[in-house]
Each structure stands twice: as structure tokens, then as C-alpha cells.
Amino acid sequence: MKKTLHELSIAECAREIASGAVSPVELTEACLSVIETHNPDVNAFLDVTVDLARTQARAAEEEIHRIGSRSPMHGVPFALKDIYDTRGIATTGHSALYRQRIPAEDSACTERLYSAGAVLLGKLATHEFATGGPAYDLPWPPASNPWLLDRFPGGSSSGSGVAVAAGMVPGALGSDTAGSIRLPAAFCGVVGLKPTYGRVSKRGVLPLSWTLDTCGPLTWTVEDAAIMLQIIAGHDPLDPCTVQRSVPDYTAALREDLKGMRIGIVRHFYEEESPADAVTVAAMEDAVKILEGLGATLVDVVLPPLADYQAATRIIIVSEAFAIHRENLLLKPELYSAVTRYRIMPGALVAAADYSNALRFQRVLADKTLCAMKSVDALLTATTHGPAPVQSQMRAEANFARPPLTGPFNAAQLPALSICNGYAPEGLPLAMQIVGRPFDEATVLHIGHAYERATNWRDRRPAFKHPNNYLEAISPGANIEEVDSKAFEDYQARIESQGMQLDELQLADLTEAMPHLEAMIARIPQGLEFTDLPSSIFAW
């Protein structure tokens, strides 16, 4: 069946534009039409930059006709999670606090995509300041999953996953701190790549955690992820987090056989420690067989406990996020959603020693992860515990209560690709992660591409299906009548000792969240050697 224009992948767009069969203007108008039709249902875009897109598309068309293409994305539309700065265009972080924030400069990634000739369609929904949870008390509603409209699209790069899955745009950028590219990729059935920390510049991107934030693409195919990474990867002299390493040709690595490759499957994450549902486990076993059929050897690999990774990453995230937002949380708490306050405020009670130990433990975990990979080329594990849940029934506590399957690879700073590996009986996507050694995105993309080409999962597209009935959204926070009164008073005293005042509901949220965080703090070894340096001191 012939694809419509908005269903073309980035690579297909490039070929069609090069042949003259499709113009950048036609492609841009096709995407804008889909946005106009479906964005009211899925809320993927906060801002559609119609005039800019048309101007850029016309300029690309003229330049390609005159001197040829700059890159495979010349004249191809893209969109940005609304934490990427765009000069003259609001970058809000999906927050009332920054509703009027107009950056004076573009982010590094925005600059590089513009230089490649790509066409910006607009800014995409995110969870407020990339905190990872849907909220209904913000100026914009949360994005909805285009496969089944009452389902969670993943986060925090929710709009990026939705827009690509819905055919609104062939590629988008997201960010990943504990899974925020890979989770929406999984729940929306698209490809999401978290590159190695330091591979892509974070300059001009609103931070959640300086230590863990990573920028990367969400696309419909693995080849498209390779194309986008090729454009945004590389050293940025204005970002000290980026490394001075050469960037390989990622598309050259996209072969369709895996002969001689050894892949370590991390079963204990999703079968034992944080069990996934039966359909996810079955999809993983089917994927193993396909990879073996492509010539790979699959062996079991054991990594440190999932809860150890969660402890290190969650303590780091809440500590750094609170440091970033402390002043505004004190002065303008009403401009934050309840979910954001719930997830950031516990950082106020993390001691400096515990934060420092979490950074040191992250380095220990990264070393152990790399050691476990010595005999394999890549790792394989599930991305999520099952298909997308009902969004309106999600609680903020989930960020603390159950360790995500994605977090270990943020702690280890490794490249990780989420790719669709089947569908649940109700038609919702399932996904797996392919994880490589530091800066070996090429191998991750190679394995993902070979698997993708051996399956027919890319033949399906979302149908924007409405559920039989929509459930009323529950309160995401704590029930004040159920919290322990003694603990409530203790946390109130600790907060007030730091010069902060919280209302009863905020204190109830803190009382519910803190025991989870305290249990994580208790998991961090207290007898680390003085030679165990923080993760912020590293050299690959």
C-alpha cells in the first residue's frame, strides 16, 4: 500500500525530495494538516509554528533546487520538546511559570537541525519541567496516546512520542533523565534513542538533573534515529558536558545481519525484581528468537539490583531538581502543578552527604555495568512492565514506588534504544531496550535496525481510538486523611527548619513520598572507599 506523505520516514522523505517526487512545501503542508486534524485529540503540540515552517520549507525547496541538499533532513519537518530553547519562540517547559519565556538564543540542537535545513513545525508537550508525570492543573492538558486516547503516552517527552506516532512529524527531539525518551517511545510504539552522556550538547535545554539529563531523537524507524543523531551529535565548545570524540557514520552501520554478535539479555530486571506482565515477557522471548535467527548469540547477563540503580538516580534527580527550582518553589509554588511539587519537594530533605554518596554510588554502578558487558556487544531488556496504563488513574507516587527498567542506563551513562517488539491483545505497543557500551550508538542502531527489518511492526499506525468510557482523573497526590500524623509533624518540623512553609496537602504529599526516598538513601552503601569518585568526575 502506498504511503501518504505524512507517513513517510525521514529517510523516505529525503529520497523523495532528492528525486523531485515530493517538495519540502508539500511535505510540510501534509504534516500541518495532520496536526490540525488530530492535535485537538492528542494535545501533542503546545505551539505550532505555522509561519516559520512555511518560510523554512520554501527556503529549503529553493536551495535544494539551486545547489542541492545539505543533509538528509533538508526540507524535512521536525519538532522539539518544549524544553529546547528556540529564539523568538516561547520555551515554557509546559509550565505556567515560564508561559511568557521567550529565549534570545537557540539551543545547540536547534541550531544544528536548522543548519541541516530541517523545518520546525513547533514545540511539543512535556511533563512540567520534564518531571515525568501527567498533570491536569497546568495551562495545557497532558498529551494523550494516539493508539487509545485514554492511555498514558509515556513521559516526560510525551508530545514527542505522540507526534511521531500520530504521523504529525517524522522526527522529534526529547530528553531522557531516567527514561523520558524511551518510555514515550515504548508506549507510543516509536523508536527512542538515549545517547551516551556527553554525545549530544545540552546547551539551551531546560535542566531537570545536570548529572543525568541527555538529549536524543524519537522517530518512526531506527534509520531515522541514526539520521537525527548524526546531525545533533558532537562536541560543543560551549557545553562542558560534551566530549571531544569523533562522530561515526551511523547510517553506515545499519546492516541487516547480526552474525558474530553477542547480546546479553538482562532477564532478572523484568522477570524477577520488577516483574513485567506475561505479554511483555512473551514478546521478549519472541525477540530473542528473531535476534538469534539473524545470527546473534544471546546469553544471560546479571547486572546490579534494579533498586540500587533507582536509589542512586532518584536521589540525584530530586536533589538537583530541587536545587534548580528552590527559589521559585518558595516564592511561586502555585505556578507549579501538584505532581511537580510532589516529585521535586523531597529534594529539600536530602542531606549533602546522601547526595554526594548517591553520585559516588552511581559511579560504582556504572563500573559494574561496564564490567558485566565485557563479554557482550550489547544488552537487551524490556523497556516497560507492560502496555500503556490509563492516564487519568496515575499517581505521583509511582515515580518513587516502582523502579523503572530504563533508569539503570542513565546511571551507567550508556546509549540505550527503545524499539517496538510487538503489540498487546488490545493493540497497544510493547517495547524492548538495546543498550551499548559508551559512545557505541552505532552497534545499538545496527542491532535495532536488523531487528526492525526482520519484523512487520512498522506496518501498523495508531487509529486514534476512543475508549468505551473515560474515567474521571483521580487526585495524583496523597490522601491527607491516610498519612501518618506523627510522620506528618516530623516532616513539617524539618521543612520549617529550612525556612519553608508548605500547606497541608503539600506536607501530606511529602509524608507519602519521603519514606520511599529514605529507603533509597538506606540502600546507598555507607562504606564507599575514598577512591570511589562521584560520577561527575569521569573520563571515558
Image: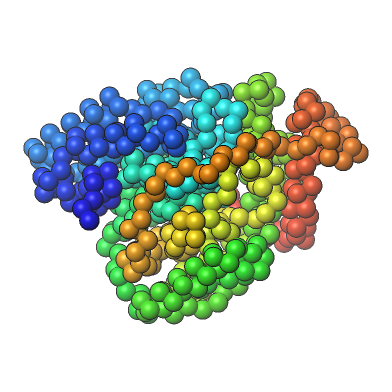
Rendered image quadrant of residue 395: top right
**Residue 462 place in picture, x, y as percent:** 39, 49
| 54 lies above or below 297 | above
x, y (%) of residue 177?
A: 55, 47
Q: Looking at the image, which is closer to me, 146 or 45?
A: 146
Residue 128 left/right relative to 400: left
Rendered view: 291 above or below 35: below
- Rendered location of residue 226, percent (x, y): 33, 55
Colouring method of the image = rainbow
Question: What residue is shown at x 59% (from left), y 34% (from top)?
Answer: 135
Residue placed farthest to the front in the image? 468
Q: Is residue 129 visible?
A: no
* 405 and 527: which is toward the camera: 405
Q: Is residue 345 visible?
A: yes
> x%, y% of residue 292?
41, 78
The residue located at (18%, 31%) in the rendering is 58
